[in-house]
Each structure stands twice: as structure tokens, then as C-alpha cells.
Image: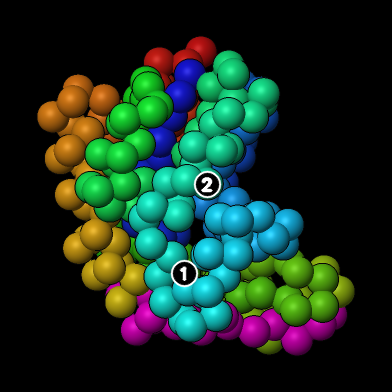
Amino acid sequence: MNLIFLGPPGAGKGTHAIRLSQQLNIPQISTGDMLRSHVKEQTPLGLEAKKYMDAGELVPDDVIIGMVKVRLQEPDCKSGYIFDGFPRTAAQAEALGHFAQIDAVLNLIVSDQVIIDRLSGRRVCPDCNGTFHTKYLEDKNVCPACGGKLIQRKDDEAQTVLNRLEVYRRQTEPLIDYYAKKGLLRDANGEGGLDENYAEVLEALGIQ
């Protein structure tokens, strides 16, 4: 099964993609991981990408697409894969369609307010790498796992979250129409608890 997971930042794409990849024994493919791997291994594509990253610019589509092509040729992709955070734009989706057969596109539906509450309440511990939510913390500044000082990532501040949602709407929401017209879109609610949402993901994709 070849799948794409779409949804705004904080919708739970990564969490559900990892869980499903373990259940189906297929890889979860994240462009962020691919980029880091190519840069670390200093592949031709990695060296090209690094030029843009060092300049603080977005890595061009053709470099990302090149990395995706290489990744899909690896043996673990033979029986399927899950794209998490790719494609991001209609142009990337068009390019992907030339060399990959996608079976279904999962669209996680979460309201802006839920996203803002989820992300702006998130705290991370630099000491043990734990991630927590203020809703479940007795002390919002102390890590319950190791006693370290909890911090809020810049990415999770309310205004930054609003900006990220705006970028998502502008760039990625057109993909929802693109894949709906191809009859590949499957909607799932992403607003409940993790297990409840995962059950909806399985139902939307027709997986027992």
C-alpha cells in the first residue's frame, strides 16, 4: 500500500504514520529525514541541498524529487510506504505522479483552535528530549521525567503556529482538491484521543 498523509502541523501525521508503518511493516518516509541523511552522507543531492540550507533558502523541488526517487528504489519500499509531509505542493504532487503509484491519500481534519491549543501547550525537555503538554503537567516548567527545565520551542509559540497554518493553507491545501479529483482522498477526524483517531485512520483507509 502506497500512502500519503496530509494535514496541518500538529494534526498527528507523524505519530499515525509511524504507528501504521509498524503495523503494516512498511517504511514511513519523511523528507526531513531524507534531507538530513543525504547531507550527512554527502551524496551529490545532499551537497546540492546543503548549499540552499546553508543560505537559509528552501531546497528546490527537483532536489527533493531526486531524493524521493532514490528512496523509493530501496528494497524496503517494495511492498509499500507512507509519505509524511510530502508532497507539500501541487508541483511536487505532479512530479511524484510520474514515477509513483499512490493508492490513497489520508487527510487528517483538525480545526485551527485545536492545533493552536495542542502546539502552544507543548513543552520539551532539552535534557531527556521528552515532549509534554501543559494540560497534563503539575508544574509547567519542570520535566516530570528527569526534573530538567521545560522550554517552549519557537515553532510552538501561538503566533508562529498561526503563521505555519497560513503557509499550510496556501501551499498544501490545494493538494486536497488535487487528490480528491483523482478519487484518492480519504478524510479522517484528527481531533480526538490518539487511539480514537488511529481507529478512524484505519477505517478511512479500509485497513482491518
List x then y, in percent, for residue 156: 48, 76
Q: Residue at x 54, y 22 (%)?
A: 80
List x then y, in percent, for residue 167: 27, 68
Q: Which residue is under mark 1?
A: 119
Please tell me the numbered disc located at residue 172. none
**Above or below, 35 relative to 105:** below
Return the residue nearer the eye: 158 or 39: 39
Amino acid tagged 2: Met
Return the residue nearer the eye: 109 or 174: 174
Q: Which residue is under mark 2?
A: 67
Read off the magenta span: 147-162
Query: Quarter of the image holding residue 60?
Result: bottom left
Q: Residue at x 54, y 31 (%)?
A: 72
- Crowdedness of circle 1 by 10 Å Cα count: few (<14), some, many (20+)? many
Q: Is 151 contained in the magenta span? A: yes
Q: Residue furthest front?
A: 44
Judged left or right of residue 187, residue 151 is right
